[in-house]
Image (cartoon, rainbow, N blue to C red):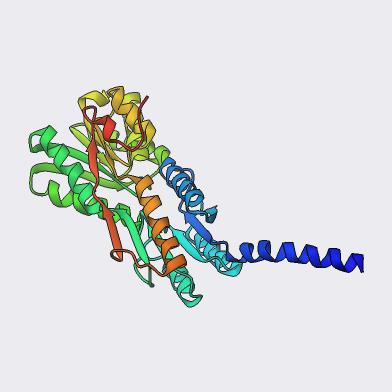
Amino acid sequence: MRKVLIALLVVTFLIPSLAFAQDKIVIGLTLPSLSHPFFVYLQKNVMDEAEKLGVEVIAIDAENVAAKQMSIVEDFIAKGVKGVLMSPIGEDALVPAVEALNDAGIPVATVDRKVAGGDVFVHVGADNVEGGRVAARYLIEKLGGKGNVLELEGTPGASPAIDRKAGFDEVIATSEIKILVSQTAKFERAMGQSVMENLLQVHKDFQGVFAANDEMILGSVEAMSAAGVDPAKVITIGYDAIPDALNYIKDGKLSATIEQFPGEQAKQSLRFLVEYIRDGKEPPSKEVYITPVAITSENLDQAEHKVE
């Protein structure tokens, strides 16, 4: 009888904890690549916000492979997560992942990057077209509306790459500035450096460089320095306001970067998802955008990261 009572007591204490475990909100998070400081920072902010909200986040790096990101989403579905937050590698490549989540009845939110199909509960990101415009306006102002520039594009098919280029090209076309070449460096620093090394063999007369992220512009700056081109004499602008870029600006090796506030993007997107799962609360709109700003040596304090 004593053993039976003990067993009953154990079960009595276990039931609430088991119920709590079942009620625990688990969110799947998949980002394109944690080799990029931007996504490392974004993930950290998701995790910090998850702790405040009392939810669990399972984060898996897609390592810049669309097929792997699709597999990650399928694994999230098999695990029975309550929701998925993702930054898709490509607009089109991850549509089947969103559709699979729709079929499973799992709400999905996107952050920073969008998908071209499926039912996404909410997208939170920067207005990347406007960010491209901001970069172009900065170059036009600094170059007096004329001159030659080089443009480095991001990963083909990725929505930020498409949108930033669209905004940049649109505004540059209103000036007398000529884009000598526009070429992808896939958002990678090493590729940004190698692409710029090759471009420097062909193009000698340029006064500005725009790269669709900081990794590429930093690689470009290093390539210019190695080739004897003083980066301080070229108007150079990146995108993302990562710590390295901010330090380059502080040291006078980079002219500007575009801040898109990834920490705020991360927090907002997770909050919207959790509020919907808990209370059925809808976001203010299906797409929520944060307006990017240009960060220079004059307003470094406005960057989300702080330079010491």
- Residue closest to the far bottom: 103
User: Is residue 65 toward the left or the right of residue 288 in the image?
Assistant: right
> Percent from the top left, x then y, of residue 14?
73, 63
Q: Residue at x 48, y 63 (%)?
A: 84
Q: Position of residue 164 (x, y in %)?
A: 25, 50
Is 265 drawn above or below residue 201 in the view shown? below
Q: Is residue 243 above or below residue 81?
A: above
Query: Residue at horizontal 38%, vertical 37%?
Result: 194
Residue in view at x 44 percent, y 58 percent: 86
Residue 210 in view here: yes
Number of on-image labels = 0
Residue 195 visible in image: no
Asked whether 146 or 2 is in front, the reply is: 2
Q: Position of residue 16 (x, y in %)?
A: 66, 64
Residue drawn at 55 percent across, 69 percent down:
77
In front here: 186 or 19?
Answer: 19
Q: Quadrant of the C terminus?
A: top left
* Quadrant of residue 15 within the rendered picture: bottom right
Q: Quadrant of residue 271?
A: bottom left
The image quadrant where one finds the N terminus is bottom right
User: Residue 36 versus residue 29: which sits nearer the camera?
Assistant: 29
Q: Position of residue 17 (x, y in %)?
A: 67, 61
Task: Determine whether, in the image, residue 187 is placed left or right of residue 284.
Answer: right
